[in-house]
Amino acid sequence: MVKLRRHLLFSLAVSGLRGPARALPCVGFATLVAYRLLVTGRGFAMPRRTVSGPEDEQIRNLTARALRERLRALGLPRSGPRKALRLRLAGAEHRVEASFLSKRRRQRVWWAKEQLRWNMTNRDGYVRPPPSLGRGSQNPLCELGECGDAACALYRFRAGCEGVRSDFMNFCAKQIEDHFWQVQTHNDEGLVYCSLGCGCLYFDWELLDQLVTRARLPIDQVWLVDPAFWRNETFSTAELKALRAFGQWFAGVFDVHSFRTARSLKRWCRAFSGQFGLAHVVMECDSVQTHTLTDDADFCRSVLHDEALGLQIFSQRLANRRPGPGRRRGPVPVAPVRCVRRRKEDRLETMQRDQWTSGAWLPDFLVNFPEDEEDPADWIAEDLRRRYR
Ligand SMILES: *[C@@H]1O[C@H](CO)[C@@H](O)[C@H](O)[C@H]1NC(C)=O
Ligand SMILES: *[C@@H]1O[C@H](CO)[C@@H](O)[C@H](O)[C@H]1NC(C)=O
Ligand SMILES: *[C@@H]1O[C@H](CO)[C@@H](O)[C@H](O)[C@H]1NC(C)=O
């Protein structure tokens, strides 16, 4: 049960290489050339937003006491050694620092995908890209992964649902691109993307890589939230290893910040939104409805841009409450559901909701959706709240 719950809550994922790869078989070489030009053209330039670092004179010379005072004024935690306080005050505490990946290794990955030498396999409970790219070249992205539970409707190899992930990825890319050009203001330097429950990050990697290379969308910030981003001296979670690979791939393209809870993300946003902006897109790519995380006025105000777009896919919803004492409900498997929402004041309003039916998305007015009886007391909601806030 514990395992099941963990899976339900955080085994997100989604994505697909099969769809896009199949859609582009004959333009492989042209695309590769275009990628090259683009990569060189954009030069995978350093992030355009210049941010003060912990080595900034103004921060470097502060005493621990002065640092704590400033942190308190910003509503940030005040514990830790001076070095950590300086980092926190500079807004860099959650930044994912990663070394650069060479252009050659990046091109090998694109090439393997183009050539359909990118067989995803189920390893350690996750569906992951191949460990090797051939000719002795290790895949720098082999630690990324997505949900590997065969019982989940979002499982890539599940009969009848094979196209769901790639389809959703393309759908999101289109939605985000249209949305960003529509709501972007002159203050925005680039897209700010936030992903909740992002796990081993395969979906986010594939989507963002597509946005950067094909859609040429300027991306400025990526904020990732997952309770599994932690380590101690001897142990790193699979999610943290994936985060490293992700950070390395995008080093120099945009800033990546990772958080273990939505609560720490909110706090950080309240302190630094003037510097880092607010999220234009919030992604929830999980297998249960995680609406409760975003159905929070405080989250909307602190983290989201005025007209933020919410994108979501899930494959489970809550069953009717079990009879008898106790308030628990069990999740029931359903077909994949995707949802588009938009911020309206302090909430996200549903704009579109579709269910995957016989190989295509059907809008909810054609599907007999069991009406939500969302109840914040329900155990999944509670669990999510506890983990993310
Ligand atoms: C910070 O300290 C250094 C010496 O450690 C000094 O040279 C510099 O002028 C100081 N800067 C400020 C802004 O006080
Ligand atoms: C990948 O999968 C295809 C089709 O399933 C197969 O023909 C090919 O040999 C596989 N490639 C590798 C490198 O395993
Ligand atoms: C680190 O975490 C692992 C896994 O939870 C645990 O087995 C190990 O004892 C921890 N090590 C330290 C030094 O805390």
Image (spheres, rainbow, N blue to C red):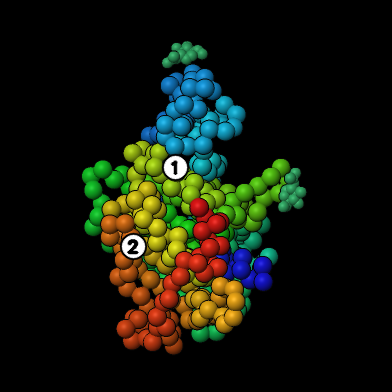
Asked whether the viewer can see residue 34, the reply is no
- Count neighbours of disc 1 (C-alpha within 10 A) and say few if under 14, some if 14 to 19, many if 20 or more: many
Question: Does 143 sit above or below residue 350?
Answer: above
Q: What residue type is labelled 1?
A: Trp
Q: Could you say which is closer to the camera, residue 224 or residue 31?
A: 224
Name the side, left or right, on which 233 lies relative to 251: right
Image spot of residue 95 (x, y percent): 50, 41
Local SS, label 2:
strand
Against 51, residue 298 (above or below) is below
**Of pointers 2 and 1, the one earlier in the residue sequence:** 1
Q: Are marks 2 and 1 in contact (CB under 8 Å)?
A: no
> Of 115 and 82, which appears nearest the observer?
82
Q: Residue at x 48, y 49 (%)?
A: 263
Residue at point 44%, 42% (across, down): 268
Numbered label attached to residue 268: 1
In this rendered view, identify the residue nearer to me: 246 or 77.
Answer: 77
Does residue 12 lie above or below 277 as drawn?
below
In this view, the residue farthest toward the front is 325
Location of residue 297 with respect to 371 vertically, above or below? above
Residue at the image position 61 percent from the left and 68 percent from the top: 5
Q: Where is residue 31 in the image (x, y as percent from the top left)?
A: 40, 62
Any mark on residue 383, and which?
none
Look at label 2 and name its amino acid. Answer: Leu
Q: Does the residue labelled 1 lie within 8 Å of ligand 3?
A: no
The quadrant the N terminus occupies is bottom right
Residue 323, position as x, y percentages in the image: 57, 82
Residue 94: % across, % down: 51, 42
How much space separates mark 2 and mark 1, taking CA atoms? 21 Å
Q: Residue 348 carries which label?
A: 2
Q: Residue at x 40, y 83 (%)?
A: 369
